[in-house]
Image: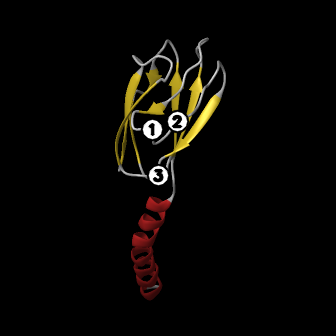
Amino acid sequence: MTTLTRRTTLAALLATPFALIAGRSQAAAHAVTIEGFAFSPAELTAAVGDTITVTNNDGAPHTLTADDGSFDTGRLNRGQTGEITLTAAGTFPFKCAFHPSMTGTITVA
């Protein structure tokens, strides 16, 4: 019985690093909502490969557009969603192309 317990424990210990590596390689999904002429959340931290779904709940059209042009949802009317996939690490300020006072930042690690 002791041998079986040791093997099980050793197997679990050996598998742990692989499970951690596998967990890191999976992309995550994030959500940003536009409502009241504001992004929520306005500050977001994500990883390379993650996807952000943006939903416009306002009556006016909006976008979520990186200041450097690296991503853009395009025009989103009320009730529409758009997706962006983060392809590079860095800090990316963004805004609404129609309402430049609407701003936020995505930090990609």
Residue 49 appears left or right of 94: right
What is the x, y in percent for residue 83?
58, 39
Residue 45 appears left or right of 59: left
Dot 2 lies on which element?
loop
Residue plotted at (40% across, 81% down): 10
Dot 3 corresponds to which residue?
87
Q: Which amino acid does label 1 sit on?
A: Gly
Dot 1 lies on which element?
loop
Numbered mark located on residue 72 in the image: 2
Q: What residue type is labelled 3?
A: Thr
Q: Residues within 10 Å of mark 3 (few under 14, many from 20)?
A: some
- Is there CB contact under 8 Å for labels 2 and 1? yes
Dot 3 lies on which element?
loop
Query: Mark 3 or mark 2, which is nearer the start of the sequence?
Result: 2
Dot 1 corresponds to which residue?
69
What is the x, y in percent for residue 20?
42, 64
Numbered mark located on residue 94 in the image: none
Query: How much space separates mark 2 and mark 1, taking CA atoms?
Result: 7 Å
Q: Residues within 10 Å of mark 2 (few under 14, many from 20)?
A: many
- Is there CB contact under 8 Å for labels 1 and 3? no
Quarter of the figure with residue 57? top right
What is the x, y in percent for residue 3?
43, 88
Q: Residues within 10 Å of mark 1 (few under 14, many from 20)?
A: few
Query: How much space separates mark 1 and mark 3, taking CA atoms?
Result: 13 Å
